[in-house]
Image (spheres, helix red, strand yellow):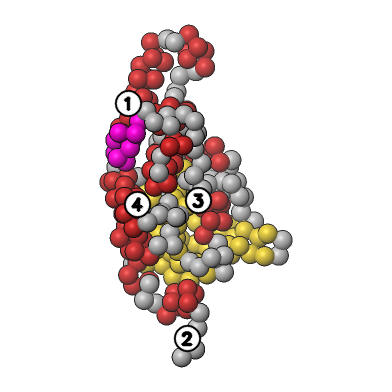
């Protein structure tokens, strides 16, 4: 049984197929890159997996359970959590406050127990705070703990967005172009942190245009073109396939 499995996944917008009959499996512990030229269906695929879109046909299964058709919050509770291309942050709150606001899925105590501040709630809250601080430390954000998100550099804001996703305690983390708009040093910072996240046992699906980033971190890639899967395998081998080169650069004319 695959950890995460897509079976003949299709999403139509009118008569346009943004994703068409895409099937692949993701094994636990992988860093899977999703690549392809603009308009190939990459973000649509992430939207389908995370529940922001419902498939026209086909299924998505996670740990043997069908999740296609569930709401985004239901999918997140099961352990499949996503980030977005833009920085979605609580700009006026400090990093630790932002982490606690994003940690609601970690609480098992009831609203009444929270209001009454029972011992069970206090113990749980202490653990959630500890997890938030550990995540900031893991991603080299600990020194920024008490600063508001709005004053961070672009690279640090992108990493905070990933930290907020980690606050939901994911088993699978869906990253949508985490290095967009970054210089080389910032991109390397993100790469190292993705590796650290994966070392914590979290499976990662990564949309990425920066091929150097992808080749440095992905254990496997799935290549999309016009909504169809055209290749699947070792990153270095896939980038040298004629059909992949043609999808990115067009047919040779020389």
Q: Residues within 10 Å of mark 3 (few under 14, many from 20)?
A: some
Pinpoint residue 54: horizontal percent, then vertical percent. Answer: 62, 50
Q: Residue at x 46, y 91 (%)?
A: 254
Disc 1 to disc 3, how far (Cα)? Answer: 28 Å
Q: Which residue is mark 4?
A: 186
The local secondary structure at tag 2 comes to loop
Disc 1 to disc 4, how far (Cα)? Answer: 27 Å
Main SS of residues in magenta: helix
Q: Which residue is mark 3?
A: 85
Single out the residue that lies furthest toward the right.
Answer: 14
Disc 4 to disc 3, how far (Cα)? Answer: 16 Å
Precedes in sequence: disc 3 or disc 2: 3
Q: Residue at x 56, y 59 (%)?
A: 9
Is 228 rendered above or below residue 59? below
- Among the 4 quarters of the image, the one containing residue 201: top left
Which portion, as a residue range, is magenta?
136-145
Is 3 rendered above or below residue 253? above
Precedes in sequence: disc 4 or disc 3: 3
Q: Which residue is mark 1?
A: 130
């Amino acid at each position: 049984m695959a950890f995460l499995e897509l079976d003949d996944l299709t999403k139509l917008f009118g008569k346009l197929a943004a994703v068409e009959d895409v099937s692949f499996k993701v094994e636990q512990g992988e860093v899977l890159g999703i690549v392809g030229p603009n308009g190939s269906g990459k973000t649509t695929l992430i939207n389908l997996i995370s529940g922001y879109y419902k498939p026209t046909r086909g299924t998505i299964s996670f740990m043997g359970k069908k999740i296609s058709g569930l709401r985004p919050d239901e999918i997140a509770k099961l352990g499949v959590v996503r980030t977005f291309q833009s920085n979605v942050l609580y700009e006026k709150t400090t990093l630790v406050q932002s982490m606690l606001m994003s940690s609601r899925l970690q609480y098992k105590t009831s609203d009444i127990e929270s209001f009454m501040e029972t011992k069970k709630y206090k113990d749980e809250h202490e653990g959630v705070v500890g997890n938030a601080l550990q995540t900031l430390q893991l991603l080299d954000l600990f020194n920024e703990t008490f600063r508001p998100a709005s004053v961070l550099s672009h690279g640090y804001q992108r990493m905070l967005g990933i930290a907020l996703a980690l606050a939901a305690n994911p088993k699978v983390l869906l990253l949508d172009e985490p290095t967009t708009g970054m210089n080389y040093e910032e991109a390397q910072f993100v790469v190292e942190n993705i590796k650290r996240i994966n070392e914590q046992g979290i499976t990662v699906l990564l949309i990425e245009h920066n091929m150097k980033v992808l080749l440095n971190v992905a254990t496997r890639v799935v290549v999309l073109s016009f909504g169809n899967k055209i290749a699947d395998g070792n990153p270095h081998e896939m980038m040298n396939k004629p059909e992949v080169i043609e999808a990115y650069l067009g047919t040779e004319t020389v």
